Image (cartoon, grey):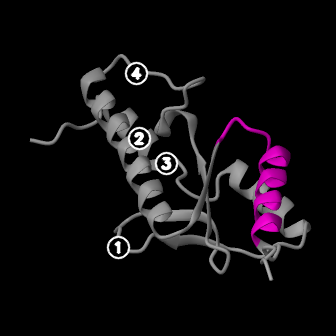
Amino acid sequence: MRPTASSPAVAARMSRQASRDTTQELAVRRLLHGAGLRYRLHVAVPGMPRRNVDIAFRKLRIAVFLDGCFWHGCPDHATSPRANAEWWRSKLDRNMARDRETTDRLLSEDWSVLRFWEHESAEDVARRITAAVASKRRPSAEPD
């Protein structure tokens, strides 16, 4: 039997949790767009059902993930619920393993993967993404 939330209130709260278009995502996207960058949203990871890149620069093969501290195990801000602790630990461990698998898959297909925590400033995140895009756009110096 699959474990469930510890109470109907917890189940209701979990179902309302935003998985896309979070405050940080919107702020970062606004800054990237303002900097003249164009990107795709929620792009499916090839061969991996139910996994999406938050912000993708497909031609440049840059995948950006904006991870929530609780759901993805931030080393600074993750918490462990006391109610139903074993179930939560298992769920959160699976989330982190899925993140590693997704990153590994994209890297194996020559994508650059950028992961940021929700507590990082949108300005800093956008600056680092912009730098990665600029770096990939620069033609490499080829020897004669």
Look at mark 3 in the image and give the residue it sits on.
Answer: 16
- The quadrant where residue 31 appears: bottom right
How busy is the neighbourhood of tag 1: few (under 14 within 10 Å), some, or many (20 plus)? few
Q: Nearer the viewer, mark 4 or mark 1?
A: 1
Say few, some or many: other residues with alpha carbon within 10 Å of mark 4 (under 14 / 14 to 19 / 20 or more).
few
Kind of residue indicated by mark 4: Pro
Discs 3/2, front: 2
Residue type, numbered disc 3: Arg
Tell me the kind of residue under disc 2. Met
Magenta region: 117-136
Q: CA distance from mark 1 to mark 3?
A: 28 Å
Tell me, yes or no, whether the two marked residues, 4 and 1, touch with CB atoms within 8 Å: no
Residue 59 at what x, y percent from top left? 66, 81
Alpha-carbon distance for marks 4 and 1? 33 Å
Q: Secondary structure at mark 3?
A: helix
Q: Is residue 122 above or below residue 28?
A: above
